[in-house]
């Protein structure tokens, strides 16, 4: 088996699995339910994925210089600005009725599902490595 992934590869795999899940879940909602459900899944997944990407950018920016401690005020302000922006997008989608609420929540869960799937796979790899030695 392969070794446990370093953080950059692990992050790349989470992003890749999240994108794949978004495509598969959107197509599945369209095929099995309706276009409105597919739009809901897509909008939720797009908002969650973009929020995850902004969070990744914020953390890289804050911790890019080794040994330098980021300012707490700036870090918290940017974190809450991202959070409030995400909440605003969720509010707009729900207020104007652009998405079915259930499908929207399913789309919002794409990033969490990808983290759980990749984490579960890495856990199985660790268990198999422990059994080999």
Image (cartoon, rainbow, N blue to C red):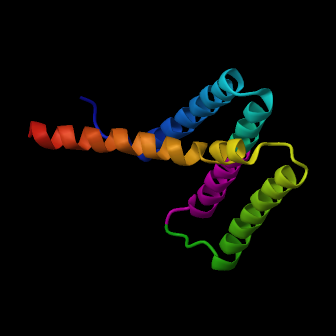
Q: Nearer the viewer, residue 85 or 110?
A: 110
Where are the magenta residues, as a range?
47-66
Q: Is residue 49 visible?
A: no
Q: Image check: 27 left or right of 63?
A: right
Q: How many marks?
A: 0
Nearer to us in this view, 58 or 17: 17
Q: Main secondary structure of the magenta part?
A: helix
Classify the position of the N terminus by image quarter. top left
Q: Position of residue 97 (x, y in %)?
A: 87, 47
Q: Residue at x 62, y 31 (%)?
A: 25
Question: Which residue is located at x 72 percent, y 63 percent?
Answer: 83
Whether 52 is among the magenta residues is yes
Q: Nearer the viewer, residue 67 or 78?
A: 78
Placement of 41 over or under 80, stated as above or below:
above
Which residue is at 78% across, 54% downward? 90
User: Outermost residue toward the bottom?
Assistant: 73
Q: In the image, is residue 106 above or below residue 35?
A: below
């Amino acid at each position: 088996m392969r070794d446990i992934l370093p953080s950059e590869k692990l992050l790349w795999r989470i992003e890749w699995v999240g994108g794949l899940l978004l495509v598969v879940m959107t197509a599945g909602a369209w095929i099995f339910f309706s276009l409105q459900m597919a739009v809901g899944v897509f909008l939720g997944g797009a908002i969650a994925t973009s929020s995850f990407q902004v969070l990744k950018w914020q953390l890289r920016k804050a911790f890019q210089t080794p040994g330098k401690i980021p300012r707490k005020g700036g870090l918290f302000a940017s974190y809450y600005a991202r959070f409030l922006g995400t909440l605003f997008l969720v509010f707009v989608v729900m207020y104007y009725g652009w998405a079915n609420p259930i499908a929207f929540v399913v789309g919002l869960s794409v990033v969490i599902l990808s983290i759980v799937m990749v984490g579960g796979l890495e856990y199985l790899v660790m268990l198999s490595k422990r059994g080999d030695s």
